[in-house]
């Protein structure tokens, strides 16, 4: 009798890509800080922002920069992944300094934050480079971040002018 051990290198690429896909949920402010860190510097089109009023949900389809993975040592490339940020229990949503009619305009996400008013409800806020923001009135924090597919290489690493 002999045993055969599967080697990691024998796994098909499609399987490995699924293993790398991020899926996170936030139910409190600490969880939300983790999600915010993962979506920092994500880019999305204005047309990829949806408020599903009848479902009390907002969905943001984005290309997130993979901060938790080092650059490839050979090519120095970093990674981006197509991801969905879904916010549940949304009562209202308002955009400020975002041209909603410009569907191909690019938004660069800086942070996702929460301001509680009458616990557990409050305002969940997405802040974008250039001063734009989206504020959602929510019953409570219920946010999910899910990668939608395989990563792709990018030579560009986001940076911020701190002066």
Image (tube, helix red, strand yellow):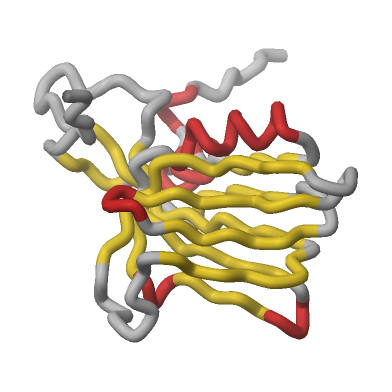
The picture places residue 63, in percent across and down from the top left corner, at 36, 53
Q: Specify the farthest residue to the right.
A: 119
Q: Quadrant of residue 4?
A: top right
- Image quadrant in which the C terminus is located: top left
- Image quadrant in which the N terminus is located: top right
Depth check, front residue: 49 or 75: 49
- Residue drawn where x is 69% and y is 52% of the image: 123
The picture places residue 14, in percent across and down from the top left corner, at 44, 49
- Residue drawn where x is 70% and y is 81% of the image: 53
Q: Is residue 45 above or below residue 125?
A: below
Q: Is residue 78 above or below residue 70?
A: below
Depth check, front residue: 106 or 16: 106
Q: Using residue 137 as the reference point, say whether residue 120 is left or right of it.
A: right
Q: Using residue 8 as the reference point, say whether residue 42 is left or right of it.
A: left
- Residue drawn where x is 35% and y is 61% of the image: 44
Q: Specify the farthest residue to the front.
A: 117
Q: Is residue 72 above or below residue 29?
A: above
Depth check, front residue: 36 or 67: 36
Number of marks present in the image shown = 0
- Residue drawn where x is 42% and y is 24% of the image: 68
Q: Specify the farthest residue to the top.
A: 2
The picture places residue 96, in percent across and down from the top left corner, at 44, 66
Depth check, front residue: 158 or 135: 135
Q: Is residue 52 above or below residue 78?
A: below
């Amino acid at each position: 009798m002999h045993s055969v051990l599967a080697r990691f290198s024998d796994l098909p690429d499609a399987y490995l890509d699924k293993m790398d896909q991020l899926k996170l949920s936030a139910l409190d402010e600490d969880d939300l800080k983790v999600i915010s860190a993962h979506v920092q510097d994500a880019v999305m089109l204005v047309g990829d922002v949806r408020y599903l009023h009848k479902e009390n949900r907002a969905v943001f389809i984005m290309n997130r920069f993979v901060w938790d993975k080092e650059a490839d040592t050979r090519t120095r490339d970093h990674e981006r992944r197509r991801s969905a940020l879904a916010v549940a229990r949304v009562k209202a949503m308002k955009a400020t300094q975002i041209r909603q009619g410009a569907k191909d305009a690019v938004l660069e996400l800086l942070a996702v934050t929460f301001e509680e008013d009458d616990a557990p409800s409050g305002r969940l806020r997405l802040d974008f480079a250039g001063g734009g923001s989206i504020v959602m009135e929510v019953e409570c924090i219920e946010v999910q971040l899910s990668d939608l597919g395989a990563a792709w290489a990018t030579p560009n690493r986001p940076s911020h002018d701190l002066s």
